[in-house]
Amino acid sequence: MADATYVFDFDSTLVDFETLELLAELALEESPDAPSTRVEIERLTDLAMSGEFPFAEALKRRLALLPLTRSHIQALAAEAVLRVTESVIRNMGFFHERGGQIVIVSGGFREVIAGVAENLGVPPDRVIANDLIYDAGGRVTGVADSPLLAPFGKAEALKALALPGPVVMIGDGWTDAEVKQAGAADRFYAFTEIVRRERAVAAADAEVRSIDELLHLEGLSGRWSYPRSRMRMLLLEAVHPAAVERLEAAGYQVETVKGALGEDALIDRIRGVHVLGVRSKTQVSARVLDAADKLMAVAAFCIGTNQIDLDAAAGRGVAVFNAPYSNTRSVVELAVGLTIALLRDVADKSTAMHRGEWNKSATGSRELRGKTLGIVGYGAIGSQLSVLAEALGMRVIFHDLTERLALGNAKRMHSLEALLAESDAVSLHVDGRTENTALIGAAELSRMKPGALLLNLSRGHVVDVGALAQALGSGRIGGAAIDVFPDEPATNADPFDSPLRGLKNVILTPHIGGSTEEAQEAIAEFAAERLLAYLNRGDTTFCVNLPNVQLAEVSGAHRILHIHRNQPGVLAELNRALAAAGLNILGQHLKTDERTGYVITDVDRDYDPAALKALKSVAGTLRFRMLQ
Ligand SMILES: NC(=O)c1ccc[n+]([C@@H]2O[C@H](COP(=O)([O-])OP(=O)(O)OC[C@H]3O[C@@H](n4cnc5c(N)ncnc54)[C@H](O)[C@@H]3O)[C@@H](O)[C@H]2O)c1
Ligand SMILES: O=C(O)CC[C@@H](O)C(=O)O
């Protein structure tokens, strides 16, 4: 199919607008009738594009409605080069390499199209469009007579060119569908990246949602790479819309679900999904991963990744990402606020006021200043809390399993027991590894200072809540602020229960440590970028279960990504397979961890797809994919 001629429509195909609608905006800026005129122009455009009204007549009527001048046309031409469709931008290489095989045919205006055609490498004599006529004052008075204005105009104009090879027509409108119907094209693809017109889709050989899909169907993309718009992303747990926007803008298909899904429900939904996005509630177990026939990556739109079976994912070549710092500050601010609220008994006093009770008393209320805060887990959150607490006048001690830099005057404690014995308030910020289950149980609570406070904003299983309820009930512990629970409801509609309900000086929050607008937006942007870097160029920076490799965009090459079990001889066998496929290696990178290896190989453009299949059978292969 390499010798085909590719004929592209312009409006809503190469660019993301309809010419006359944008001209209406420009020309009617000052007009009091602008809204009604715009509606009429949109109506005529839709009628013409869906084939319900003759194109030439619709063009004439729309032009008559607008006080158009040369400067409006020039302004639109300048804007058009900036409004090229996302998937056209991604596939500039195709347009530049095959400019001589491409024709642009449009009922729009040559002056508007010329700059875009030039940028795409399409020669001026391969642009078929209308020429505007101006009067002496530069006002548009109509369009020059051309075959485009006759019935089946595009088809007739193309026939006159006697194009070589099979002719492939790509466009969003009915006049594009007519090109094949009138015998001027062999195939018609309904292009729906910008607008989906049912009548054109029904008449098409296939619907393509992007240029990537077109190239895939025409066998022109790297035959192993997969068009983005066919890649399905499933984002659960009300991930912030900024992520959806970013991923859709990059050409991927995104589905969202508000709450978490249970294991069986997720197993039902995961088939055919290429990327899964979760927050803290959805358990991505080995069973889920077994059912995930297409899964390439999982993004945790949060810090914790204990809800994901990281080893099982690595064993299937599935990359897992998170957003390790985007909500850190939000958690810290809440921990500080909760400590003050506990020291001043704010929650109980407020509840009493709501019942109509006035209890002005200082008894038991204390300042933060001078108190000792014991931080368990001095990672990103713990160390940031240390800085803020010290700035508020607290004395900070901490305990961590690994060596951590003590910030400010914070003092390291060599055991949890020593920390518990000295702290007025203990704040837990350990990670969610299973070994941390019941890290704070009855024995640890009994080692705390009488009346001390406990805060848990880490993971629910870290505290034995039954033991805590007893210690609070007996007055041994003076108060607690708990944000995370062993059993958390999957959605806001599900009920919540805990032995901590109803106890005095206990503040319960619904796992909102990281739930600020700032944090959720930052997480969405960070995690979406990580996913795109991995999908589009193989970059695994910040991946939590595969070796981290930072990679630049692929340019002038195909990139082969090969994830394998870390066992002897894989690289040698891979390179033998590449040599047998006749591939010239332009660059290669291997990184391993104790269980997995990741090889990135950039090869020159000429390759035989059949021979590449051998790469899949290299012993130890977990996953293999090709970028272009
Ligand atoms: N409540 C929320 O909404 C919310 C928001 C974000 C993060 N989190 C949770 O907060 C926790 C901390 O997050 P982070 O970003 O600081 O993680 P981090 O990985 O940067 O830090 C965790 C620290 O805990 C230490 N640690 C682990 N087990 C320990 C133990 N038994 N004793 C002492 N130290 C131990 C680790 O060595 C590490 O330094 C995680 O569990 C995370 O899931 C909760
Ligand atoms: O947003 C969430 O569901 C979890 C937030 C928090 O626990 C995290 O790990 O970042």
Image: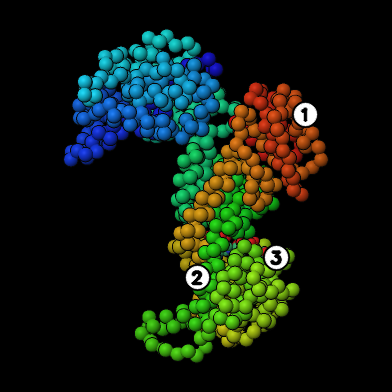
Q: Residue at x 61, y 28 (%)?
A: 556
Q: Rounded to the nearest whole Å, what is the CA distance between mark 3 and mark 2?
A: 29 Å
Amino acid on which disc 1 is placed = Arg
Disc 2 or 1, which lies upstream in sequence?
2
Q: Position of residue 10 (x, y in %)?
A: 38, 26
Q: Residue at x 34, y 12 (%)?
A: 156
Q: Position of residue 507 (x, y in %)?
A: 50, 76
Badge 3 crowding class, 10 Å Cα cut-off, few under 14, some 14 to 19, many 20 or more, is: some
Q: Residue at x 49, y 57 (%)?
A: 520
Residue 65 placement, left or right of 612: left
Q: Position of residue 360 (x, y in %)?
A: 42, 89
Q: Position of residue 141 (x, y in %)?
A: 21, 22
Q: Quadrant of the N terminus?
A: top right
Residue 576: assigned label: 1
Disc 3 or 2, which lies upstream in sequence?
3
- Residue 288 makes an appearance in the image: no
CB of mark 1 near ligand 1 (< 8 Å): no
Quadrant of res 372: bottom right
Quadrant of res 106: top left
Task: Please tell me in which quarter of the rendered image ligand 1 is found.
Answer: bottom right
CB of mark 3 near ligand 1 (< 8 Å): yes
Kindly report which numbered mark, 3 or 2, lies closer to the viewer in this rendering.
3
Badge 1 crowding class, 10 Å Cα cut-off, few under 14, some 14 to 19, many 20 or more, is: some
Q: Between residues 100 and 348, which one lies in front from this camera angle?
A: 100
Residue 404: assigned label: 3
| Element type where label 2 sits in the image | loop
Q: Rounded to the nearest whole Å, what is the CA distance between mark 3 and mark 1?
A: 45 Å
| Element type where label 3 sits in the image | loop
448, above or below 58, in the image: below
